Image (tube, rainbow, N blue to C red):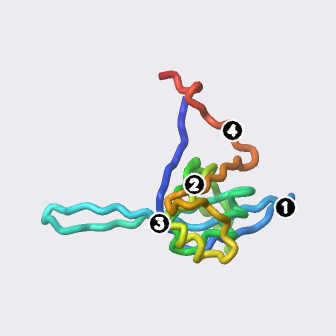
Amino acid sequence: MSVNKAILIGRLGKDPEVRRTNSGQAVARFSLATDEQWNDKNGERQKRTEWHNIVLWGKLAEISEQYLNKGKLVYIEGRIQTREYDDRDGNKRRITEVVAGEMRMLGSREDRDSSASNAPSYGSSANTRETVETTPPSSPPAITDDDIPF
């Protein structure tokens, strides 16, 4: 048995770029920044930012296009995938991405409302989150607690 799961909370480095497949399914891509902070041997505060390539399919892609923009805080849960492609010059390139199966918009309601004038109502609590799940095409079935042997 194996597990391929990534959980990230970070801020968008750019607005989602949304395209459509030949069959019309939406695919969104954006970068996500996560920060790590620690004190070094001299007691000085250090910070490192890690950048992640995020891919959303279907309904998640459509929601990201409508409500997410650069700087917004999001929770991403998905699987890590590495793929190869040819760049414009014909060179082989590899990219590692997190293909999200779940996305939650975090932050205050005011943050979300200011990003889109027609943002949906999330209830009366500023901490309420909307969760949308989707499965990208030809992905393996989700692993449940019943599948784990311990």
The residue at the point 51 percent across, 63 percent down is: 126
**Residue 33, numbered label:** 3
Residue type indicated by callout 1: Gly
Circle 4 residue: 140
Residue type indicated by callout 4: Pro
In the rendered view, does 12 fall on the left or right side of 58? left
Residue 4, x across and y down, in percent: 54, 41
Q: Is residue 68 above or below residue 8?
A: below
Q: Earlier in the sequence, mark 4 or mark 2?
A: 2
Do the residues bearing badges 1 and 3 touch, measured as CB atoms within 8 Å?
no
Q: Is residue 140 visible?
A: yes
Residue at disc 3, secondary structure: strand
Label 2 packing within 10 angstroms: few (<14), some (14-19), many (20+): many
Circle 2 residue: 98
Q: Earlier in the sequence, mark 1 or mark 3?
A: 1
The residue at the point 58 percent across, 25 percent down is: 146
The residue at the point 71 percent across, 68 percent down is: 18
Residue at disc 4, secondary structure: loop
User: Where, by quadrant of the figure, is residue 115 drawn?
Assistant: bottom right
Residue 143, x across and y down, in percent: 61, 34
Label 3 packing within 10 angstroms: few (<14), some (14-19), many (20+): some
